[in-house]
Image: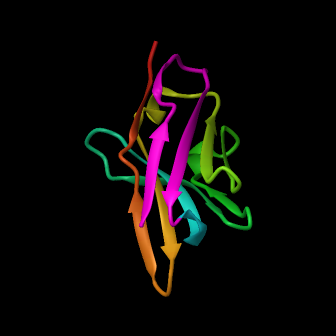
Amino acid sequence: QVQLVESGGGLVQPGGSLRLSCAASGSSSSIVVMRWYRQAPGKQRELVASITTSGTTNYVDSVKGRFTISRDNAKNTMYLQMNSLKPEDTAVYYCNADSFLGSIVRYWGQGTQVTVSS
């Protein structure tokens, strides 16, 4: 079992920055990839960024150059640094992790609200 807890969401003005954190506990050493998803009201959940254990990252086009995903394996924590925030970034942001112990099991955090508004 893996537990994921997000933090760092809040209200920020357009152009501002926030850093989200996702702390993993339990069988965190079995995690092979971690991701950030987001879901805006009335929209489907969208993959924002991912990072593997080796540090390979991927981003959705809409956040490239503005968001940076990183991972501190010693602290079992993943981060999402969000700069130049736009109103369209407003959503609930979810942490996600795939654990491999003979098979892949996917875990989700509870989500953290990010609101970009003046």
The location of residue 31, given as percent across then percent down, is 56, 68
Q: Main secondary structure of the magenta part?
A: strand
Give how far across and how far down residue 38 sits, in percent.
Answer: 42, 46
Residue 53 or residue 76, whichever sits in front: 76
Residue drawn at x 42%, y 32% is: 90
In the image, what residue occupies the spot 51% across and 66% down? 27
Colour mapping: rainbow
Q: Is residue 38 above or below residue 85?
A: below
Residue 116 % position (x, y)? 46, 23
Total marks placed: 0
Dividing the picture into quarters, in which one does residue 17 lie? Answer: top right
Indicate yes or no whether the magenta region holds residue 56: no
Residue 20 appears left or right of 69: left
Residue stretch in magenta:
1-27
At a point 46% along the width and 12% down the height, the residue shown is 118
Residue 56 shown left or right of residue 42 in the figure: right
Spot the residue most to the bottom: 102
